[in-house]
Amino acid sequence: MPDLNPFRPLRRLAPKPLDGVLSLPEMAVDDWVGLRHGIPGDNLDDWDPDYIRRVLPLMSTLVNTYFRGEVRGMENIPEDGPVLMVGNHSGGTLIADTFVFACKFYEHFGPDRRFHQLAHDIAARMPGLGIRQWGTVAANHDNARKAFDLGAPVLVYPGGDHESFRPSWETDKIDFGGRKGFIKLALEQNVPIVPVVAIGGQETALFLGQGRKISSALGLENLTRVKVFPVQIAPPFGITLLDLPLRLPLPAKITVEVLPPVDLKERFGEDPDAEEIYDEVTGDMQDKLSDLSDERTIPIAG
């Protein structure tokens, strides 16, 4: 019988795994096999501390050298129990600040502390990326609730693709687009909000705009939940659309700062107003982002 496995040639060509780290073809095969059991992205048990333990040294080396990743204020994340970490989103689909933060989280707390990141369906469900083992799941309230039930911190980006594809000249701007679902979730689950503010991701390419009218005209939102159709300039192809064809992110310095936790009822009362919470939380984050921007000298160099 002929060998019909399309990944067999790739496995022959791929380097042997280093110290137990899965090679990319092996990760791809495992994810494609997983498709037989349903669409991936909603199974929190894909989180794999043994995998994180093996891969973390390599990932940390990458983010610490290429992006010169720096995370401040990790002590502001409670030592245990569920919290909702709310971040600003940068860097298109290649969100370097998320990788920097995830590496620093697992370095600080250890790979055995469960931690989940909510991501766009396209990223969370795509086979072969190896991010679900890090705790990445599709962004919805059900997945967040399941993570909280397990006592896990959850990282959410309310701004989504709207904020991640903002123009590069708005690198120092918090832009959640008025989305307040994270507030409803935190109040419903009675968990504190921990703001996570990052800068540098919007310097990994020259982002020219969100292209929301183009996305609407093409019906992308109905097809993929993508509400933007942005243009970027970056190597190796020059101009890319929606980060396609795949671009190489520029080695911008990524700096992240974690702010103190916000107990919503303690700060805003027993019957808090979502609008007031939104204005104050995003205002605090904007103040910190402005401070981080003032620290930078020139783009990319940081």
Image: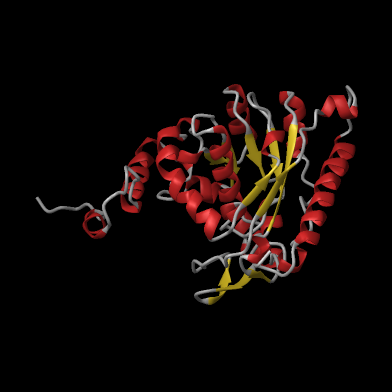
Residue 39 location in percent, x, y?
Answer: 45, 40
- Which residue is depicted at the point 55% across and 65% down? 249
- Which residue is depicted at the point 37% across and 35% down? 37
Would you identify the image quadrant in which residue 214 lies?
bottom right
Question: Could you tell me if residue 208 is visible in this image?
Answer: yes
- 79 left or right of 272? left
Q: Nearer the viewer, residue 70 or 6?
A: 70
Question: Could you tell me if residue 40 is visible in this image?
Answer: no
* Residue most extreme to the left: 1
- Which residue is depicted at the point 85% across and 35% down? 274
When the figure is inspected, residue 245 is found, relative to residue 37, above or below; the finding is below
When the figure is inspected, residue 136 is found, relative to residue 256, above or below; the finding is above
- 184 left or right of 116? right
Would you identify the image quadrant in which residue 201 lies?
bottom right
Residue 4 location in percent, x, y?
Answer: 19, 53
Q: Nearer the viewer, residue 281 or 65?
A: 65
Number of marks present in the image shown: 0
- Which residue is depicted at the point 49% across and 29% down? 112
Residue 32 location in percent, x, y?
Answer: 35, 46
When the figure is inspected, residue 54 is found, relative to residue 126, above or below; the finding is above
* Residue most extreme to the bottom: 238
Q: Which quadrant holds the C terminus?
A: bottom right
Residue 26 location in percent, x, y?
Answer: 31, 48
When the figure is inspected, residue 54 is found, relative to residue 12, above or below; the finding is above
Would you identify the image quadrant in which residue 12 lies?
bottom left
Q: Nearer the viewer, residue 279 or 18?
A: 18
